[in-house]
Amino acid sequence: MGTALNTILMITVALLTTGVINRTRAILAGRKGVRFFNHVNGVALLLRKGSVYSTTTTSLFRIAPAVYLGAAVTAMLFIPVADLDPLISFEGDMICFAYTLALARAAIILAAMDTGSSFEGMGASREALYGALVEPALMIGFATLAMFCGYTSFADIFAREQSFDLHLTIVMLLTAYLFVKIAFVESGRVPVDDPRTHLELTMIHEVMCLDYSGIDLGLIHIAGWLKTACFSMIAADAVAAVCCFRWWFAAPLAVALTGLAVGIVESTQARNKLARNTTFIVTVTALAALIFFIGYLLQLDINI
């Protein structure tokens, strides 16, 4: 029962986060904005349509959306919602989670290159670069959690509420902030990318999907929501572990953390120039290393 509820909550977080982003952006801009579930209605419409394929593409282009969605769903099943158990759990599943998402990225990159389009090729090269740059931050963030909790499985790390410890609280809050920053990169949001733009020369994720339509495009959108939900929930679990380790607290917190953060940033900042994106992502990696170093020093509990 707990496993089923965990999966349902993860799907709910994925569906609600984009709605919160849209509503936050509309409120801060003084607009009425679109309906809260407008993104769901849009994808439902895409799922009822057929797909059109270019004659230059191969079967790789056709199967990539299914692989992309399948990898995102599998990654989602590793993540617990506070005190609930995930569907998949084993020692070292953090590494499997990271490279399952890497499989999703590889599938969409290869599909973009398969079109033979120069624009999609540029988007694919940028996606590959940003993925390589953000991977150390992701791994260091996992290492920080493993160092303090002593486990390499999400279910074990977030199996119970941690006793109050100032050092642990500081590290967990900083780690939550790190995973929110990683969510900006992985979901292609401002300041790294802007899903609302239509200028091919500056697009990253969206330009790789230009040749997709109908059900294939719908699958890609759903996978993007699930990826965002994964990082949101990891951040929320880190906060809940030292605050209120209950699923009814962690699930709304995951929606609020990323939904409000992305909405506020997209309303107050412009996207970076492409030349500055690498600096931004390397800064996130440096932040991850700094958090790990701070956690290591706090764990030593050196008395001076």
Image (cartoon, rainbow, N blue to C red):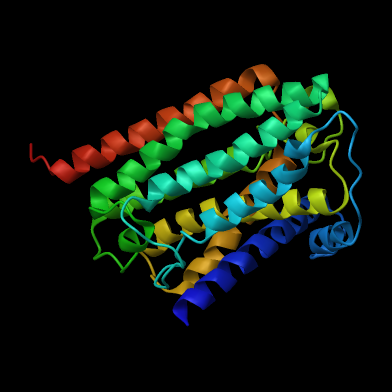
Which residue is farthest bottom? 1
The residue lying at 43 percent from left, 47 percent from top is 96
Tell me where residue 46 appears, x and y as whole percent. 87, 56
In the image, is 235 to the left or to the right of 93? right
Of the 4 image quadrants, the one containing the C terminus is top left
Does residue 242 appear in the picture of this structure?
no
Rendered view: 67 above or below 161: above
* Residue 152 showing in the rendered view: yes
Task: Report how many numbered discs are placed on residues in the image.
Answer: 0
Residue 80 in the image: state x and y as whole percent: 44, 64
Identity of the residue drawn at 61% across and 35% down? 106
* Residue 269 vertical position relative to residue 12 in the rendered view, above or below: above
Q: Residue at position x 61%, y 49% from top?
A: 261
Q: Residue at x 45, y 79 (%)?
A: 2
With 227 as the anchor, is 49 left or right in this view? right
- 213 sits left or right of 13 in the view: right
Identify whether 275 is placed above or below 187: above
Residue farthest along the left direction in this orientation? 304
* Image coords of residue 283 (percent x, y): 48, 27
Q: Residue furthest front?
A: 59
**Image location (x, y in percent) of residue 62:** 78, 43
